[in-house]
Structure formats: C-alpha cells, structure tokens
C-alpha cells in the first residue's frame, strides 16, 4: 500500500524497461490504485496495468467501469480490472450487512461492468446490484474483466463471465487439477472462450542473512489468517489453519508456494505455473518489500526477470 506516488515508479520502470508485461497492484488503502496508476501515466511511465484485485464494496460497478476506462485512456494501454468481494466483515462495515451471496454479488458486478464497458444502456436488476442507464461513449483501449479466484465455485463464475481468473497463493497443481478444469467446463457450457489464468506468486531471492519464513509471514500474514485462503490451501494439500499464520507461512515456504532460491532457481520454479495452464505470472515481492524496503524488492524483481527473459 504505497504512501507516496513516487514509490510506484521503480516498479513501473521495470515493466517499461524489462521483459515484464504488466504492472499489477492489489487493493490499497493508501494511494488508491487507479489514482496511483494515473500518476505513473502523467510521469511518462505509461505501461499496461492491472488490479489484483480491487474490492467491490468500495464502489458501485458504474464507478469501477468509469475508473477503468479512464485509466485505459490515460495509459494508452489495455487495463485489467480485477475484482473481488473482500471479507464479509468489510462488506458489513461499509454496507451494514455482508453480501447474502458473495458470488451472487460478483455475478451482478461483472454483468454490469460488461454492459457498461460495451457501451450498452442497461436495465439490470441483480440480486445485489442494479443498473439503469449507461456511460457516455468514449473511445479507449480494451478493459479486460478479471475475477479473484481461490476455490471451484469462483472458478466456475470466472468461466461464465470473466476474461481472466486471478489466483493468489495457489499451488500450480491446484490450478491444473482443480481450478482450470472448472473454468474450462463452465466457459464451454455457455459457449464462450475460457478465461486466461493470472497467478499472483510470492517470490524472494535467497540471500545471506535472509529468513524465508520471516519474509513469508510479512508477505501474507493477513491472507494466512483468512478462512477462505486457508480453506483453499487445505484443498490444495497444505496443513494450515487460520489461527496459526506463522506456521502457515512455514508451510507456504516448505511447499514451494512461496518461491525462493537463487534468481535462476526462482525463474526455473515459476515454469511450473506455465505447465499448469497459467497464462501470466505476477511476481509479488511483498515479503521483501515489507521486510527490507522497496530497493531490495526491485533488485529481486530485476534479477528474476533477467533469468525469466533468458
């Protein structure tokens, strides 16, 4: 969660200057992601960008579509608008009650986004969101709709409605054997192309004095305390429990879900995601950034990207 826009520049410059394809950012309660990305475009560092993910209770889909297409114009590149429902506690804090059905709310949200970004005037009454009207026409690069996916039900929804499925901390075998088949079958059932798969993967280069278990804790403590993440990891075969985030972090490292090693070894291990049917891997150095700062995180990314390019 950047506190100053300049913190984003070294990461955007990596995308501009290396083989990296896109700059990704999750929900931030510091500098809001769309505004941070717009700052980068204004600084002359316009690169493809994506959200992984922003949380639906923070904005109506009309506002989300407006923000995404504005960013596409400002950056002159296609944008991935990745969304997720957030926790029931967050939804209740903002809306007075949790979503009766998080997947139902996400289905409404994606349906409205699709219509608005296609230039339609809509009359839609969903289970949680409604939309009457449309956005004024605006020529802009494409906006790709992404859905945060951890478990089979969300994978099926992505297959039905999303352009890409964005996974987080998902082992490659779990993507291959559980998530990808659900997406493919759901897409085939409604006669549309299967969504591509984007995997956000924690990475860190092994260096003298670094403790990979500490990096994993600092990277993922909140996620490892969340029941939906730990349930996914249990389905994938890891022994985890939401009340033990420190032990969960150790399990991530030991299972290779938090990918560490030399830069060359990290690049080699990431090929397992390609073999599992993942189309785009997001290199997440949050553990290094939180523990050692942005300079160390950028250094790790540059070394890994050099080996990926090779």
Image: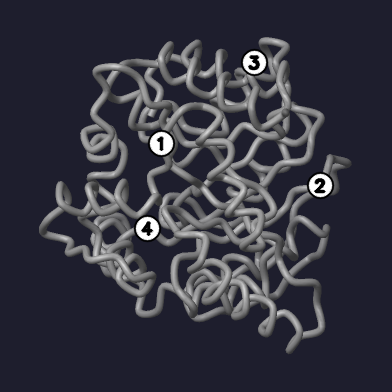
> What residue does disc 3 label?
13
> What residue does disc 4 label?
86
Q: CA distance from mark 2 to mark 1?
A: 35 Å
Locate residue 294 relative to residue 25 in the image: left or right: left
In front of the other: label 2 or label 1?
1
Of the image marks 2 and 1, the number of the one nearer the N terminus: 2
Q: Are marks 4 and 3 in contact (CB under 8 Å)?
A: no
Of the image marks 1 and 4, the number of the one nearer the N terminus: 4
Q: Residue furthest right?
A: 139
Q: Is residue 265 above or below residue 249?
A: above
> What residue does disc 1 label?
260
Of residue 208 and residue 197, the one placed in the foreground of this image is: 208
Locate residue 57 relative to residue 123 in the image: left or right: left
Whole-percent x and y of residue 240? 21, 63
Q: Secondary structure at mark 4?
A: loop
Task: Kindly identify the residue that appears in the image at 58 percent across and 40 percent down.
Answer: 268
Q: Secondary structure at mark 1?
A: strand
Locate residue 83 relative to residue 22 in the image: left or right: left
Whole-percent x and y of residue 73? 79, 32
> What residue does disc 2 label?
142
In front of the other: label 1 or label 4?
1
Of residue 104 and residue 268, the one placed in the foreground of this image is: 268
């Amino acid at each position: 969660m950047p506190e100053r826009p300049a913190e984003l520049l070294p990461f955007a410059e990596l995308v501009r200057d290396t083989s990296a394809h896109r700059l990704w950012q999750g929900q931030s309660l510091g500098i809001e992601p769309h505004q941070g990305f717009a700052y980068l475009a204004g600084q002359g560092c316009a690169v493809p960008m994506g959200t992984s993910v922003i949380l639906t209770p923070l904005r109506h889909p009309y506002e989300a579509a407006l923000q995404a297409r504005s960013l596409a114009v400002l950056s002159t590149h296609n944008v991935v608008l990745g969304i997720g429902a957030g926790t029931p506690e967050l939804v209740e804090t903002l809306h007075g009650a949790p979503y009766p059905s998080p997947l139902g709310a996400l289905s409404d949200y994606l349906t409205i986004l699709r219509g608005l970004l296609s230039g339609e005037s809509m009359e839609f009454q969903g289970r949680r969101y409604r939309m009457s009207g449309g956005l004024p026409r605006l020529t802009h690069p494409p906006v790709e709709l992404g859905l945060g996916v951890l478990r089979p039900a969300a994978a099926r929804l992505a297959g039905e409605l999303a352009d890409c499925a964005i996974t987080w901390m998902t082992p490659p075998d779990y993507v291959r054997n559980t998530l990808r088949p659900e997406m493919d079958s759901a897409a085939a059932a409604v006669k549309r192309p299967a969504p591509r798969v984007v995997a956000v993967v924690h990475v860190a280069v092994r260096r003298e004095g670094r403790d990979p278990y500490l990096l994993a804790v600092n990277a993922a403590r909140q996620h490892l305390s969340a029941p939906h993440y730990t349930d996914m990891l249990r389905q994938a075969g890891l022994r985890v429990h939401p009340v033990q985030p420190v032990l969960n972090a150790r399990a991530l490292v030991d299972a290779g879900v938090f990918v560490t090693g030399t830069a060359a070894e990290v690049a080699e291990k990431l090929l397992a995601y390609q073999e599992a049917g993942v189309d785009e891997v997001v290199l997440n150095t949050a553990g290094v950034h939180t523990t050692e700062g942005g300079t160390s995180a950028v250094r790790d990314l540059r070394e890994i990207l050099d080996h990926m390019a090779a």
